[in-house]
Amino acid sequence: MNLPTRNTRQVERPFVTKEVLAQRYGVCGRTIKKWMKAGILVFFKVKRVVRFHAEGCDETLRTRGFLG
């Protein structure tokens, strides 16, 4: 039985870091911070760790006209 390894299977994670989100949208980390402050992005913070719900952010940016 062949089990999938990290190299053979790409898993979409529902929660991502600021850096991954910035790369996803082709913007810098500062833009992500501004969108956080404006209340545009869906995220949660536990102590100093911030994670973004990728699909929720996609939907929000799409409805606000940032994504096509």
Image: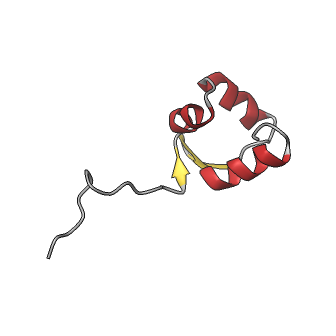
Q: Is residue 19 left or right of residue 44?
A: left
Q: How many marks are shown on the rendered structure? A: 0
Give the colour scheme shown. secondary structure
- The quarter of the picture where the N terminus appears is bottom left
Residue 63, position as x, y percentages in the image: 84, 48
Q: Is residue 7 above or below residue 32?
A: below
Going 72% across and 44% down the picture, which residue do you hit? 41
**Residue furthest to the left:** 1
**Residue furthest to the right:** 64
In this view, the residue in front, 9 or 21, is 9
Residue 67, position as x, y percentages in the image: 75, 40
Q: Is residue 19 left or right of residue 9?
A: right
Residue 60, position as x, y percentages in the image: 78, 49
Going 77% across and 43% down the picture, which residue do you hit? 61
In this view, the residue in front, 6 or 43, is 6
Q: Is residue 42 above or below residue 48?
A: below
Going 80% across and 41% down the picture, which residue do you hit? 39
- The quarter of the picture where the C terminus appears is top right
Q: Is residue 49 above or below residue 53?
A: above
In this view, the residue in front, 51 or 3, is 3
**Residue furthest to the front:** 68
Going 52% across and 32% down the picture, which residue do you hit? 19
Q: Is residue 62 left or right of residue 32?
A: right
In this view, the residue in front, 8 or 40, is 8
